[in-house]
Amino acid sequence: MLEIINLTKIYDDGTVALKNVSFTVPDGEFLVVIGLSGSGKSTLLRCINRLIEPTEGRLIWNGQDITHIKGEELRYVRREIGMIFQHFNLVRRSSVMKNVMSGRLGYSKTISSMLGKFPEKDREKARRIIDRLDIEDQIHKRADELSGGQQQRVGIARALMQDPKMILADEPVASLDPVLAHSILMNLEKLNQEDKLTVICSLHYLDLVQRYASRVIGLREGEIVYHGSKEDIRAVTDEEFKNIYGQEAERVGGSLEGSLG
């Protein structure tokens, strides 16, 4: 279980990205975070895995306060929290296999692993994961030869190599067309339901949120302004919608109109 208690992040330029954010994520939940660009979604996810240092508040992961841990302790915790990025964050000139294998680096300090030489058991694990994500025919291709959807599957495979208990997905389908978006989210849903992985995913299209979320949190200017179940978000009112996205936002066919990143 993840507990976020009064989390605040103020950047060096004075920008308040998060302000007293508190919520709990039970094991096995598919939580979706929604909100405008700049609402604090990415900062929240990056604070959870400590890519960004919180200014105030506490992060409790399975009973352990991870807010200020460092070094080996932080490295161990990060094994349990996989991260999937909007722009994939792959080594573009490296093969699919090498990108996926990099997910094991947190488990080894050896020079051979740093040079890309991993035990055969790890390579076999990577092959199984790659096969599960239907990119086995791309295994020897360079990452920059793949489509966006294929690259994001590589990103998911890399995260799975960590043996995570939770996956953070920061706008994982923002650069994909609707068909590919559903494909990627269906992969995350499968991992959530079959592997019981907790998923925290930031999205901004309501049709996707309503289809995949088990619970929803809405951020606006760094504060939680909406908290609802799957049933609640499917019945979201215009007033609730505008409270999240602003008075100028319009609902169009379950999606959002305008530049709402």
Image (cartoon, helix red, strand yellow):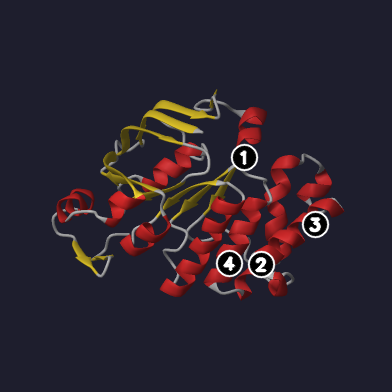
Residue 226, x across and y down, in percent: 26, 43
Q: Residues within 10 Å of mark 1 (few under 14, many from 20)?
A: some
Q: Amino acid at mark 3?
A: Arg
**Circle 2 — which element?**
loop
Q: Residue at x 74, y 41 (%)?
A: 107
Q: Position of residue 167 (x, y in %)?
A: 54, 47
Q: What residue would you read off at disc 3?
A: 123
Residue that numbered label 1 is attached to: 80
Q: Nearer the viewer, residue 7 or 114?
A: 7
Kind of residue sitting beneath label 1: Glu
**CB under 8 Å between callouts 2 and 4?**
no
The residue pinned by badge 4 equals 151
Mark found first going from the N terminus, 4 or 1: 1
Up the image or down, 123 lies above or below 181; here it is above
Q: How far apart are the two marked residues, 2 and 4, measured between alpha carbons?
A: 12 Å
Mark yes or no: residue 118 visible. no
